[in-house]
Amino acid sequence: EAEVAQSPRYKITEKSQAVAFWCDPISGHATLYWYRQILGQGPELLVQFQDESVVDDSQLPKDRFSAERLKGVDSTLKIQPAELGDSAMYLCASSPRDRDSYEQYFGPGTRLTVT
Amino acid sequence: KNEVEQSPQNLTAQEGEFITINCSYSVGISALHWLQQHPGGGIVSLFMLSSGKKKHGRLIATINIQEKHSSLHITASHPRDSAVYICAVRSSQGGKLIFGQGTELSVKP
């Protein structure tokens, strides 16, 4: 069964360092989402791509976060510089199209700890 | 106040008990999702519904659009049901998913 792949699964970094996460969605899925989940809370959307275009990045802290999906397939989320408050689970999800009838399929997540 | 509220936040049950998790929302929606998250982070979609009731195995999800309320029921609970259950609604204004804070369920043998 096809799955959303993410790497790394765990990342520990010092504050002020740069960190990057990678996501490979299910083949053929046009819509890709990056979420941040702080411990004890539900996920929060950071950025949504439709193919290679950003559809929604209203909650992305653009002073330090960036995301790209250059060829409309895999995607990278970067934080530079990392801050202590960035410690969280970063989840990637994909769906065939962003329509009501399509569910989102989540990857295993990357757990980031900033020290 | 959060747009999606779940109750309870934590729940401990004995194996075999009937479990109910509630979700209330304050926005207009086009669909509601129930998700399961195991320790380690992976999220699995359990149900997506916009009206009525759905059943899958021991899991039942219901939604009352007029009351803006949904429930997830687990019959004959088992320790392997231990997980965080998350309610998420797809907003009819903009279409993005809005997540509840999750309900952490622990089923004891």
Image: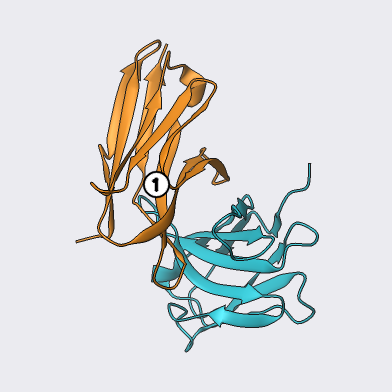
In this rendered view, identify the residue nearer to me: A26 or B53: B53
Residue at x 35% of width, y 40% of height:
B63
- Residue A19 seen in render: no
Tell me what hue chain A is rendered in. cyan
Q: Is residue A14 left or right of residue B13?
A: right
Quadrant of res A23? bottom right
Callout 1 crowding tier (Cα within 10 Å): few <14, some 14–19, many ≥20: many
Q: How many marks?
A: 1
Q: Give x and y (percent) for residue A91.
A: 56, 59
Quadrant of res B108? top left
- Residue A11 seen in render: yes
Quadrant of res B74? top left
The residue beneath circle 1 is B87
**What chain does mark 1 sit on?**
B
B33 to A57, vertically: above or below: above
Tell me what hue chain B is rendered in. orange
Q: Give x and y (percent) for residue A6.
A: 69, 58
B39 to B88, vertically: above or below: above
Amino acid type of the residue that numbered disc 1 sits on in the rendered structure = Cys
